[in-house]
Image (spheres, rainbow, N blue to C red):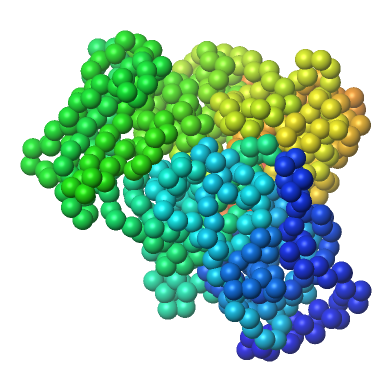
Amino acid sequence: MRNLLSLLFLASSIGLFAQTPPTVPIHNIKFVSASDLANCNDTSQYFNDTIRTVGVVVVDGGLVEVPSGSVQGGFRPFMYIADTATGATSAPFKGLEVLCSYSTGTGLVAHPIATQVVAGDIVEVIGRVGMFANNTQLEILNFNSLSLLAGTQTPPQAAVVSVGDLNNNNRINQLETGEQWEGAFVEIQNVTVVNVNLFAGGNRVSFDVVDAQGNRINISDRFIAQKLPSHTPVNPESPYALANGGPGNGTFSPPTVGAFYNSIRGIVMHSANGCLGGNGRGYELNPFDSTHYNLGASPPFVENVARTPLVPNASQTAEINFTAYDLDGTITDIKLYYSGDSSQPLSAFTSITPQLIPGTVDEYSAVIPAFPNGAFVRYYIEATDNDNNVTLAPFGAGSTAADFFYYTVRSGGLVIPDIQFALDNGNSPYTGQAVTVTGVVTSSIKVCDLGFVYIQDPDFNEWSGIGLVGSPDLVSLFREEEVTVTGTVQENFGFTQINVTSVTKTGNRRTVTPVSVSPNMPAMYASGEIEKYEGMLLRMENPNGKIFISEPRRGNFGDYLISTDTANGLAESTIVLAGRDGNSRSSLYVSVVNDSVWATQNGQMMVPVVVTNKSMEFDAIDGVLFFGFGEYRLLPRANDDFINPNFTLDSLDCRPLISVRSFEGSADVRIYPNPASGQFNVEIAEAGNYALQLNDLSGRTIRSQVMNNGKSVVSVDNLPEGMYILRVVDTQNGMMVKTAKVLVKK
């Protein structure tokens, strides 16, 4: 069957490409000169070119596991191939990622060959050389861009690479030695787990390891090998799928901080940071088989660390409870170290000995004394086993980097900066915890606004904004309202948010003044300091002049760049996103977009399209700072966030609402049946042009369609049970005529 497919695809390919693009070896596509890399330029010389290449498949297509809401079938296919001249082991600049989805005009579809290939197959690919977060990839053009050729070849085995060649001890990409391994199959050796990150609601996991020198790399989950038991395979050819005789779920068990690996193998991918201006994970490693994890001798494990109360006041001690055990021996010593002085070195921390909780064999408790209000308290746990293996929680065995559990003593309870502040510019210390905080709404789901809810504490200028998802009651919030929310802190692909369970309006109103920053701040992006503004309302302005479009179109996902000079590149610019693409959370009430396609793709824009160009200038641009896909982006909420542009922005008299007045039109809208199972109907009595959107409680657009003669049928057949938010909008004036909750029951 595979041979038949090969012949069919090859024949159709020859018919389509009467003038075949130039054939370029993978090495030439991937090669970047030493001088370019030294100057922080990792771009292929063939970037944006359409070329043809031939490679040997390194990873079975069924092992790729990338869920996607924008590709039909819910799966985004990739192939990993090597130059046919590579040899027995992976070699510099000879590995390549291929993106194997393409547009049919009605949406993106996965190419069937991509999931059927096995390691050793020879493939021909015709596509455009692109980049995603500085990871070079070949993007196929259409159905005929991928062919399975006759014959096979032994794929290259993993090359042993030093972690320090890829990243430094801050996980910053080392371009001069690391770029050559991007897309290649490699092995790292003698590493220790220092951080385990459960994200996407606890349904995904990645973890950081360090070598003996402290160089750090993330082990990521591009393949089924690292999917958790809660994950159901989306790749139709996955050997883990029930239909293919598999268990029907992932089987990976996350390591514990302190676990030691003799070696880990996988494909190197790039998530740009450092001088490149992104805030990604650097070079990361993606194992694609369970045998790629070679676990060594087991050090003690310290888990389930909990603090009571979560936020002590000045009169309260903090009780620390945790579990500690050793899989191949016994724990011989255990200590908790703490300090209430933020400048105190480790050597000056106070030591106490935790006690076993009566009736248990591995549950411990220790008490940190009370500290004054405002004190920043740090602490960590050290466990030693009978083989003198040491685990430092949350450090990880053998690590000397400054990483702690920590809290700030507060008289009035938790504030947003406590949730957002992270010592390592990383995940919130309250991830997974139930919290209650108060803030002022800076963007809402209302008409003429971002379409997503953020709150901010106006008493702080850093770490003080956060996104809210989850509760259907968020739809009732207006800008400038002060609200108290309760929910669970989540990290959604590195973006901190609260999954809200209850919302209470305090009755107070406050104005949040945008924090002024320059779009040209390379040092802040390179160091990760920009993290302190995540979720906050910012004003990008140039103290010495205007703001300009420095790159009108950056990639295919709706981004463009702004800076203080049109000649500035990514490192000296800020990314702006509008027009809404998939999970990007951007606004439908912003005209300034990088392509007119966003008028109707991934949502119906409610204002006229104005395509970016380098002649545009502004006094300032306001927006909320969002982190996603490894990069920070400014999300303007509506056209009035563009301050004094040198061109006309038609807002259709659209102004964000800041009070509880009628925000819906008077049209009679019927929604039935509700609850719905397979589908529901939307009918509007008044003549006009209407569009509707169905969002889940995280704000993600599930359905977006234009109503036909005031009627629409919305399919919910493949949606999970739960509450959804339906919005009906008059496309002529941008007015929202109905917002309603729709319950899906099966």
Q: Is residue 23 above or below residue 682?
A: below
Q: Which residue extends farthest left?
A: 359
Q: 710 or 75: which is nearer to us?
A: 75
Q: Is residue 12 above or below residue 464?
A: below
Q: Locate the N terminus and report the quarter of the image it occupies.
A: bottom right
Q: Looking at the image, which residue is at 81% across and 25% down? A: 564
Q: Is residue 61 above or below residue 591?
A: below
Q: Locate the C terminus and report the quarter of the image it occupies.
A: bottom left
Q: Quadrant of residue 25?
A: bottom right
Decide if residue 691 is on the left or right side of residue 432.
right
Q: In the rendering, at what x and y percent does residue 219 appear?
A: 48, 52
Q: Looking at the image, which residue is at 35% across and 52% down? A: 260
Q: Quadrant of residue 699?
A: top right
Q: Quadrant of residue 407?
A: top left
Q: Looking at the image, which residue is at 37% across and 18% down? A: 344
Does residue 230 appear anywhere in the picture?
no
Q: In the rendering, at what x and y percent does residue 707 appear?
A: 72, 52
Does residue 22 appear anywhere in the picture?
yes
Q: In the rendering, at what x and y percent does residue 87 appear?
A: 64, 73
Q: 239 or 291: which is nearer to us?
A: 291
Q: Looking at the image, which residue is at 46% across and 50% down? A: 206
So how many labels did they put on this image? 0
Decide if residue 392 is on the left or right side of residue 449.
left
Q: 312 or 687: which is nearer to us?
A: 312
Q: In the rendering, at what x and y percent does residue 572 appear?
A: 75, 31
